[in-house]
């Protein structure tokens, strides 16, 4: 979530959030969705976050990662595909200062040990904003109501990307995990 939000200039808290999904599959005591979509409205930019806790094929080679749709093309992981091209091109040079550690968790531990704020990959406030997105998505989800998969919701208005994401979720459940969606319901969160 940090990396996704960092790609949106000035992104702190979104204008609105809507989340949907459910806990599909084995019946247990869990309350957290194992399949969830959250859509964060940042005005000209939206951040769509998908969670799949059931077996799933990756999207454009990404099982866990970020995909950026830009005016100039799309970034899948470390590959940039210019608009209209099926061949990757070099990513533009991006200047980034990273502190010690191989990933964000290791960086946090290293900064705690060194006691130097300057060793952190990001200020603690950045972590707060990213955690807040997760909380907002879960609040939307928990305040929602059960709705059937069919007919398809109109909760997204004319947001083509949101409906494409919902279609991927339906395909994930039906084709990859064998659920029969007719008669099934999911939790549609409040916006």
Image: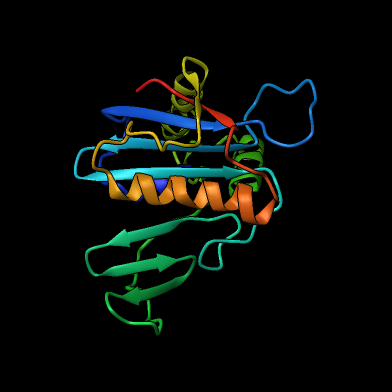
Identify the residue at horizontal 48%, vertical 42% (top origin). 1
Viewer-nearest residue: 49 or 176? 176
**Residue 6 seen from this side:** no
- Number of callouts: 0
Viewer-nearest residue: 165 or 72? 165
Q: How is the structure coloured here?
A: rainbow
| Residue 89 in picture, x, y percent from top left | 37, 82
Identify the residue at horizontal 50%, vertical 52% (top origin). 168
Viewer-nearest residue: 24 or 7? 24
Q: Quadrant of residue 130?
A: top left
User: Is residue 119 left or right of 157 when viewed as pictured?
Assistant: right
Q: Is residue 138 above or below residue 25?
A: above
Q: Quadrant of the C terminus?
A: top left
Q: Is residue 175 above or below residue 1?
A: below
**Residue 28 seen from this side:** yes
Residue at the bottom extreme of this rendering: 87
User: Is residue 164 left or right of 98 when viewed as pictured?
Assistant: left
| Residue 123 in picture, x, y percent from top left | 44, 36
| Residue 96 in picture, x, y percent from top left | 40, 59
| Residue 113 in picture, x, y percent from top left | 67, 37
Q: Quadrant of residue 26?
A: top right
Identify the residue at horizontal 45%, vertical 45% (top origin). 166
Viewer-nearest residue: 57 or 24? 24
Identify the residue at horizontal 78%, vertical 20% (top origin). 29
Residue at the top extreme of this rendering: 143
């Amino acid at each position: 979530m940090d990396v996704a939000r960092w790609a949106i200039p000035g992104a702190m808290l979104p204008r609105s959030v809507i989340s949907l999904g459910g806990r599909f599959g084995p019946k247990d005591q869990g309350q957290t969705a194992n399949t969830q979509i959250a859509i964060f409205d940042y005005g000209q930019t939206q951040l769509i976050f998908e969670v799949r806790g059931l077996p799933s094929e990756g999207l454009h080679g990404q099982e866990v990662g970020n995909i950026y749709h830009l005016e100039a093309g799309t970034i899948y992981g470390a590959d940039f595909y210019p608009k209209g091209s099926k061949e990757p091109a070099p990513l533009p040079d991006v200047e980034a200062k990273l502190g010690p550690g191989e990933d964000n968790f290791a960086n946090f531990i290293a900064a705690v040990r060194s006691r130097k704020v300057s060793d952190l990959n990001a200020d603690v406030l950045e972590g707060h904003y990213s955690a807040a997105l997760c909380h907002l998505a879960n609040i939307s989800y928990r305040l929602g109501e059960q709705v059937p998969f069919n007919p398809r919701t109109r909760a997204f208005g004319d947001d083509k990307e949101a409906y494409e994401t919902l279609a991927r979720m339906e395909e994930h459940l039906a084709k990859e995990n064998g659920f029969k969606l007719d008669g099934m319901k999911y939790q549609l969160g409040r916006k």
